[in-house]
Image (cartoon, rainbow, N blue to C red):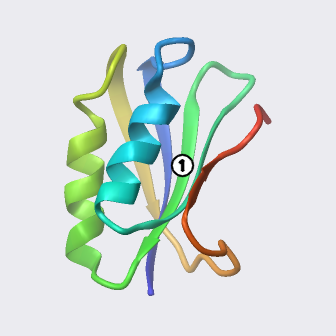
Amino acid sequence: MAGLHLVVHGRVQGVGFRAYVKSIAEGMDLRGAVWNSRTGTVEVVVEAEEASKLSSFVEAIQHGPGYVGRVDVTRSEINNLGPGFEIRPTI
């Protein structure tokens, strides 16, 4: 299974960005989680059966509420995410 860890920079906290990310992920049938970090970024872990879905996901979240300045993407093996996509508390 293909997985990514994303760090989204910009004005992405307090604007409904996490709910937007969750909606996009669920619409694409992806598993993972999204949370605010104390540094002002939003972090996402996401996995998919098809790597092409991940590219589409990264593109889609850049058009959400607020302002996305940049997205740092790290490919990784992510295990034990469980079913579905969740919004987690701030870390």
Question: What residue is shown at x 61% (from left), y 52% (from top)?
Answer: 86
Question: What residue is shown at x 39% (from left), y 57% (from top)?
Answer: 26
Where on the picture, by quarter, is residue 50?
bottom left
Where on the picture, by quarter, is residue 40?
top right
Q: Foreground: 64 or 40? A: 64
Q: Foreground: 60 or 29? A: 29
Where on the picture, by quarter, is residue 39?
top right
Judge the density around disc 1: few (<14), some (14-19), many (≥20) Cα neighbours within 10 Å.
many
Query: Dot 1 lies on which element?
Result: strand
Reply above or below: 29 against 68.
Answer: below
Looking at the image, residue 3 sits to the left or right of residue 79; the answer is left
Question: What residue is shown at x 22% (from left), y 29% (from top)?
Answer: 63
Residue at mark 1? 44
> Where residue 20 sits in the image (x, y, percent)?
39, 34
> Where residue 25 sits in the image (x, y, percent)?
38, 55
> Where residue 60 sits in the image (x, y, percent)?
22, 43
What is the quadrant of the N terminus in the image? bottom left
Q: Foreground: 27 or 39? A: 27
Reply above or below: 30 against 5.
Answer: below
Amino acid marked by disc 1: Val
What is the quadrant of the C terminus in the image? top right
Looking at the image, residue 58 sits to the left or right of residue 89; the answer is left
Looking at the image, residue 58 sits to the left or right of residue 81; the answer is left
How many badges with numbers are in the image? 1
Reply above or below: 80 against 89.
Answer: below
> Where residue 79 sits in the image (x, y, percent)?
65, 81
